[in-house]
Image (spheres, grey):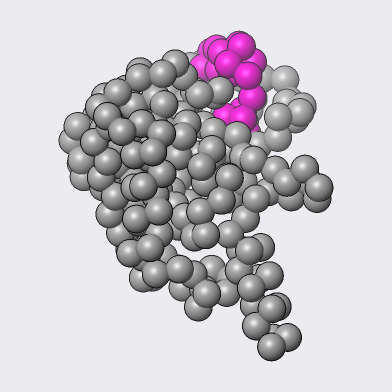
């Protein structure tokens, strides 16, 4: 649902902000900073904004785009916020072979929702390019597993689980959403959702970022793809 390439580097070094910076450089730095501390974000944003203001007093297409990116980035929160902070929260994923990484992601979203949680589960064309896609569990099973888990940890929540066949699903349609939960890998998708909502005249969502869960033994991200690969290897041996 909320897709996109990995962005940023928590330990990255940033070039000094200069009035000579190009629009592209400013845009790149803002995206890169999305994975860093709020203090660093605030300090650098102030410098970027000052540089940008001096650079261009006109409302060109580029200037509007840069300011929109700054506003989007200012809505990002990491680590996750306080419990029950938002009325309605949305998130999405494939949720194949529900594992601890999925549970961490779902639990974080459920904890900050006070009333309703909306979950899009990828189906159809959203699965086409996934590795071992033929081994992905049926949509009905994945949706039921997600719903059962949310109800097991926070039964008072209204749980809406639905299949999605595009990267946005209900996130750009539901007028009453307050927040979208993403991982650091899918943060660009969260920003894209807010751009789509703005185009439709809908309110901007607060973006909450959840850190990924890693395997202690291998140092790799917990992955449904890895689980499907293991199953494929077992099938070959039969």
Q: Quadrant of the C terminus?
A: bottom right
**Residue 231 location, quadrant:** bottom right
Image coordinates for residue 222, horizontal then vertical, percent:
65, 50
Image coordinates for residue 64, horizontal then vertical, percent:
38, 31
Q: What range is drawn magenta here?
A: 31-51
Q: Does the magenta stretch mainly form a helix, a strand or a loop? A: helix
Give 207 or 45, whichever is nearer the viewer: 207
User: Does residue 91 show up magenta in the picture?
Assistant: no
Q: Is residue 43 visible?
A: yes
Tell me: 70 left or right of 43.
left
Give 146 or 11, whichever is nearer the viewer: 146
The residue drawn where x is 21% and y is 45% is: 173
The residue drawn where x is 65% and y is 37% is: 8
The residue drawn where x is 39% and y is 49% is: 146
**Residue 89 location, quadrant:** top left
Image coordinates for residue 182, horizontal then vertical, percent:
48, 39
């Amino acid at each position: 649902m909320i897709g996109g390439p990995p962005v940023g580097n928590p330990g990255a070094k940033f070039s000094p902000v200069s009035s000579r910076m190009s629009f592209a450089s400013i845009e790149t730095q803002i995206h890169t900073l999305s994975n860093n501390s709020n203090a660093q974000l605030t300090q650098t944003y102030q410098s970027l904004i000052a540089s940008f203001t001096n650079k261009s007093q006109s409302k060109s297409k580029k200037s509007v785009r840069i300011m929109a990116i700054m506003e989007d980035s200012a809505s990002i929160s990491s680590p996750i916020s306080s419990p029950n902070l938002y009325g309605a929260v949305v998130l999405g994923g494939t949720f194949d072979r529900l594992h601890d990484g999925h549970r961490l992601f779902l639990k974080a979203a459920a904890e900050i929702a006070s009333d309703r949680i909306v979950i899009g589960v990828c189906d159809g064309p959203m699965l086409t390019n996934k590795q071992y896609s033929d081994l992905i569990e049926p949509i009905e099973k994945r949706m039921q597993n997600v719903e059962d888990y949310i109800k097991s940890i926070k039964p008072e929540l209204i749980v809406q689980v639905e299949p999605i066949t595009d990267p946005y699903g209900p996130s750009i349609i539901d007028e009453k959403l307050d927040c979208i939960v993403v991982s650091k890998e899918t943060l660009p998708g969260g920003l894209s959702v807010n751009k789509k909502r703005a185009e439709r005249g809908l309110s901007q969502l607060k973006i909450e970022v959840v850190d990924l869960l890693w395997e202690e033994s291998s140092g790799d991200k917990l992955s449904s793809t890895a689980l499907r690969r293991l199953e494929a290897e077992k099938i070959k041996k039969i």
